[in-house]
Image (cartoon, rainbow, N blue to C red):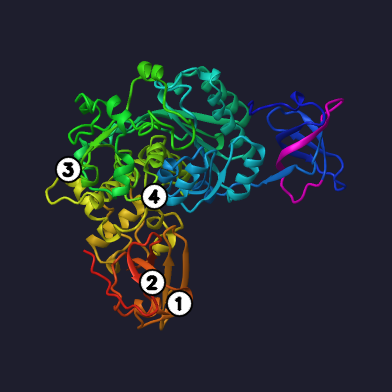
């Protein structure tokens, strides 16, 4: 695919998708004069154009003729995408292309960028993405015009598009055929979508050899010339901040009006020198997971279980995790994602090697064969993603999805850098830079690991990191989407909530009572730049309280309830309308835990979080459980 195809390459009667600027609009809709963005050529367009937008994307417009001047027609299957100017708020919205399981969107969300729509050609990966994200999803080729129109319709005017484009043409374990590999067309498809969607920032991720590939450089340079964008690129090595290998190249293509983003490679962080800091011991997982991950006879032979050479593939507590691969768990069998119906060939395994991460199972159900593949929760922890997310029983499919993700830690650094520049322009300065966001996300992820692998003896020695982890305890049960949901934090000055701003509020609440905070207060010690003091909420209504129901996807239902009532009263009333439910967590607007029988005070804001997976506390119209105290 050529994302910059000229009308001249399309025969009369064929279809073309182009971005045009309206020079003269015909009120009769017979001969609009337009300028084609990527070529600068003028053309005539006939057909209905609504509204006042001066820039349009014509999706599958019909080429009527080429001479003496190009003429297009808005046919019955043509879609018109109307573009208006972006606001600063649109830079906190993301179209996540080639989304896979959702590592990029997970990292972007941590710094306050919400994915409005994701797209992947694999329905199974889209389904995994839905488990932890409430974004809209589209399944299909991101470069297909009709898919692009669907993305535009669901994007909510997002100004940023991201994509981890196919790495096999450039990877050391791939064929390294570059442009000769059909999968290399993934990058032109992404750029085609970015051009037609008219986003202002494009974030790309791939293996580091792609950064030196001629085809990649050629595509990016051509896109920059046509779109008038600047390009910055860096390499990020995960093991410098997290005990796992994942070395990736990142590009940011951005509208030149933003000035200079100023991407920098991150510096090494101490405190997490080995896997044991995240996974101090091996858990017993669901017996169904254990059975699904156990090695079959062929895998036992190939990995050396029979001859005793398998330890070279084992996960060791004192080591650094290896780079996760899409084929983890499926090199000798069909890939569960559907990309191949058979195992890798003997010749390929001989040429490239056999790679996997094996674990000694602690479950009795596989005592006859105690060696298994790494569990998805273990793989998530190693790659810097919330390891408490349960993606379901198809654990080998989940493992293949994790093997493709960009680490959310790396994504947080990139998106944090982009937002720092956006906020420097929109607010003169940003409160939380990429380093602050990375430190906060890092501590939150370790806290999540400690939920899965609680430990009575310390495995982390870094005092600053331990202190940061301890501040997360009041909200440890929240998912990332719940944590950065703006209505949960009423003291925010605007609608942007990030992992760093939440941690800052938790530290402030711990250090000093909220009522004593004033504008002269010193900055929170852990952050790199000053933040504004929290504001008081003076909008309380006498005699009533605000109640917010939050489901597992972060969607909210807010209403008022009579003060003096308890959470039991609220839930009984709700259960009579909707039936039984599972309550995961109840707290006030400051993150303090509430009991079921605590009277709700006038003006108090209460959040009730529901669980969708059957966990938490079962509650029905005739059930009055006790809310356990949470330390």
Q: Which mark is residue 560?
A: 1
Q: Position of residue 607 (x, y in %)?
A: 38, 68
Q: How busy is the neighbourhood of tag 1: few (under 14 within 10 Å), some, or many (20 plus)? A: some
Asked whether the beta carbons under mark 2 and mark 3 sit within 8 Å of each other, the answer is: no
Asked whether the beta carbons under mark 3 and mark 1 sit within 8 Å of each other, the answer is: no
Q: Earlier in the sequence, mark 3 or mark 4?
A: 4
Q: Quadrant of the N terminus?
A: top right
Q: Earlier in the sequence, mark 3 or mark 1?
A: 3
The part of the chain drawn in magenta is 48-70
Tell me if 312 is positioned left or right of 622 in this view: left
Q: Earlier in the sequence, mark 2 or mark 1?
A: 1
Distance from the alpha carbon under mark 3 to that under mark 1: 45 Å
Q: Which residue is mark 3?
A: 462
Distance from the alpha carbon under mark 2 to that under mark 3: 36 Å
Q: Position of residue 300 (x, y in %)?
A: 28, 29
Query: Residue 518 occupies which quadrant of the picture?
Result: bottom left
Distance from the alpha carbon under mark 2 to that under mark 1: 9 Å
Distance from the alpha carbon under mark 2 to that under mark 4: 34 Å
Q: Secondary structure at mark 2?
A: strand
Q: Quadrant of the C terminus?
A: bottom left
Q: Which mark is residue 392?
A: 4
Foreground residue among 167 and 486: 167
């Amino acid at each position: 695919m050529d994302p910059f195809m000229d009308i001249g390459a399309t025969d009369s009667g064929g279809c073309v998708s182009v971005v045009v600027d309206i020079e003269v609009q015909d009120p009769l809709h017979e001969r609009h004069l337009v300028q084609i963005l990527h070529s600068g050529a003028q053309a005539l367009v006939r057909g209905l154009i609504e509204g006042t937008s001066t820039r349009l994307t014509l999706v599958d417009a019909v080429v009527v003729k080429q001479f003496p001047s190009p003429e297009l027609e808005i046919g019955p299957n043509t879609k018109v995408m109307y573009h208006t100017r972006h606001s600063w708020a649109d830079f906190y919205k993301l179209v996540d292309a080639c989304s896979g399981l959702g590592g990029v969107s997970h990292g972007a969300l941590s710094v306050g960028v919400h994915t409005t729509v994701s797209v992947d050609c694999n329905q199974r990966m889209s389904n995994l993405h839905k488990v932890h994200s409430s974004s809209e999803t589209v399944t299909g080729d991101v470069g297909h015009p009709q898919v692009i129109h669907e993305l535009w319709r669901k994007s909510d005017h997002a100004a940023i598009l991201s994509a981890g484009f196919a790495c096999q043409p450039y990877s050391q374990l791939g064929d390294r055929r570059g442009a000769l590999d059909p999968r290399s067309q993934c990058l032109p498809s992404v750029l085609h979508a970015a051009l037609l969607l008219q986003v202002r920032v494009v974030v790309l991720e791939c293996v580091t050899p792609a950064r030196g590939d001629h085809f990649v450089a050629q595509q990016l340079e051509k896109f920059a010339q046509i779109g008038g964008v600047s390009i910055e690129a860096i390499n990020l090595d995960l093991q410098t901040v997290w005990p796992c290998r994942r070395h990736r190249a990142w590009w940011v293509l951005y509208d030149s009006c933003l000035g200079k983003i100023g991407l920098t490679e991150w510096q090494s962080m101490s405190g997490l020198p080995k896997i044991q800091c995240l996974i101090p011991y091996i858990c017993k997982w669901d017996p169904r997971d254990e059975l699904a991950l156990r090695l079959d006879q062929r895998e036992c032979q190939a990995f050396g279980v029979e001859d005793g050479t398998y330890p070279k593939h084992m996960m060791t507590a004192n080591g650094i995790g290896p780079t996760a691969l899409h084929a983890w768990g499926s090199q000798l069998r069909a890939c569960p994602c559907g990309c191949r119906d058979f195992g890798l060939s003997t010749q390929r395994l001989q040429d490239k090697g056999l790679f996997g991460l094996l674990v000694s199972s602690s479950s009795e159900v596989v005592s006859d064969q105690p060696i298994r593949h790494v569990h998805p929760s273990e793989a998530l922890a190693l790659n810097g993603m919330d390891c408490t997310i349960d993606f379901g029983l198809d654990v080998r499919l989940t493992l293949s999805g994790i093997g493709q993700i960009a680490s959310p830690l790396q994504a947080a650094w990139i998106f944090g850098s982009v937002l720092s520049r956006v906020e420097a322009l929109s607010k003169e300065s940003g409160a939380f830079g990429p380093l602050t966001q990375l430190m906060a996300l890092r501590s939150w992820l370790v806290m999540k690991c400690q939920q899965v692998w609680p430990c009575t003896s310390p495995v982390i020695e870094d005092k600053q990191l331990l202190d940061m982890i301890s501040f997360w305890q009041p909200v440890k049960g929240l998912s990332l989407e719940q944590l950065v949901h703006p209505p949960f934090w009423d003291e925010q000055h605007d609608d942007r909530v990030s992992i760093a701003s939440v941690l800052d509020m938790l530290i402030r609440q711990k250090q000093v009572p909220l009522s004593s905070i004033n504008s002269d207060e010193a900055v929170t010690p852990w952050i790199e730049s000053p933040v504004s003091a929290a504001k008081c909420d003076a909008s309380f209504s006498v005699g009533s309280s605000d109640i917010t129901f939050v489901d597992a996807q972060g969607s909210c239902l807010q209403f008022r309830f009579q003060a003096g009532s308890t959470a039991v009263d609220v839930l009984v009333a709700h259960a009579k309308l909707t039936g039984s439910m599972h309550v995961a967590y109840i707290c006030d607007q400051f993150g303090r835990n509430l009991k079921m029988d605590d009277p709700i005070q006038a003006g108090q804001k209460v959040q009730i979080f529901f669980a969708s997976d059957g966990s938490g506390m079962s509650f029905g119209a005739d059930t009055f459980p006790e809310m356990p105290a949470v330390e």
